[in-house]
Amino acid sequence: MIMFAGEYAEYKAELAELVENSNRADLADLNIKYKDPKAHFESALKKLLPHQRRDFAGMFKALDGLPATIRLLDPPLHEFLPHDAASQRDLAKKLGVSLASIKKRVEDLHEFNPMLGHRGCRLGISYPEVTEMQARAIFEAAVQVQKKGIEVNPELMVPLVGFSNELELQVEVIHRVAKEVFAAKGSKVKYLVGTMIEIPRAALVADEIAKTAQFFSFGTNDLTQTALGMSRDDSGSFLPNYVELDILSQNPFASIDQSGVGQLMEIAVKKGKKGRRGIKLGICGEHGGEPESVKFCHKIGLNYVSCSPYRVPTARLAAAQAAVS
């Protein structure tokens, strides 16, 4: 799918231009021109759908009525393509394309700062078909499990939103697919659609975003990176020295930087509640299992924390201590 995503995007752009200019006479030629990339892209999504549906059905069964927060596809596209020569040759053989085309696609997808590049909701906006496929898999799985007498509570989370209309575009796709699935299956499930607050702009315009989002989940790993201008993967070379010199009291990727990142979170909480009464607020990431961070989240009014399984006992204890203090 990723191999042909670029050409598929070109197809959609040319198709939109034809429709805008009411030039439908050239539509057949356009479909012939992009026949292969269009077929490969759409076929790949169809193959992914049952795998995703099966995974989501398993989640809903295991959770047995508990909320299932599902973060939509987020990683940069380049992560899905091979970068060594041997793997590139294997992929070229499997797809029936030239090695040169594989190498070119890898080069085309290269980004100097991929974690702030073509990922998250940006990917879904460029290729709404991907969001559509994931939403369809979620809702079909939810209906399937609910018909077996098991309660389901899917919560679809759109990542890396910084502008309210980014979320609006993705939510529009999600709601449309939900209606289609419910109509086809003759059954409905209740669901929420929300977003991650993981870049500073999202925190500052949280009241606008909350008009569309039914919940916020603070992605404090990325929010810390973008607020502090520090890479979590590369900061190890200087952070110990910063702590030693009292520039930082502790590693901000281990415990929330309450005076900086925390202030952004407080702004988002206040504005989020202003934009939507009763909005659900939480945190996801490793900070969700760190005691001082959990206490801070309780203090600013978050409803829940999410963390790695092995951190759950610590998070529960910290939440209990925060509640009684």
Image (spheres, grey):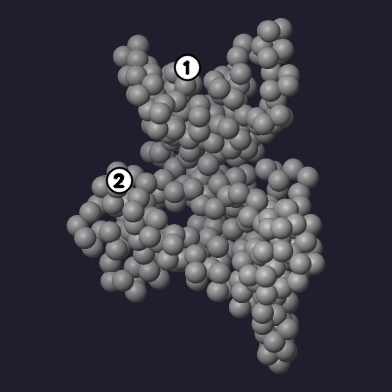
Residue furthest to the left: 149
Image location (x, y in percent) of residue 123: 63, 56
Label 1 – label 2 distance at C-alpha: 28 Å
SS under mark 1:
helix
Along the polypeptide, which appears first: circle 1 or circle 2? Answer: 2
Residue 297 visible in the current orientation: yes
**Mark number displayed over residue 63:** 2
**Left or right: residue 15 compared with residue 291:** right
Residue ID at (62%, 44%): 162
Task: Name the residue at 61% across, 78% down.
Answer: 39
Does 9 appear above or below 74?
below
**Quick check: marks 1 and 2 in contact, CB under 8 Å?**
no
Q: Which residue is mark 1?
A: 292
In this rendering, the answer to whether 292 lies above or below 253 is above
Query: What percent of the width, then of the height, locates residue 233?
Result: 67, 31
- Locate residue 142, reporting x and y percent: 33, 58
Q: Residues within 10 Å of mark 1 (few under 14, many from 20)?
A: some
Would you place residue 169 above or below residue 159 in this image? below
Quadrant of res 101: bottom right
Quarter of the picture containing the N terminus is: bottom right
Mark 2 falls on what kind of element?
Answer: helix
Amino acid, disc 1: Glu
Q: Quadrant of the C terminus?
A: top left
Numbered disc in front, either 1 or 2: 2
Q: Residue 124 appears in which quarter of the rendering?
A: bottom right
User: Looking at the picture, which amino acid does disc 2 mark?
Assistant: Leu
Is 1 above or below relative to 272? below
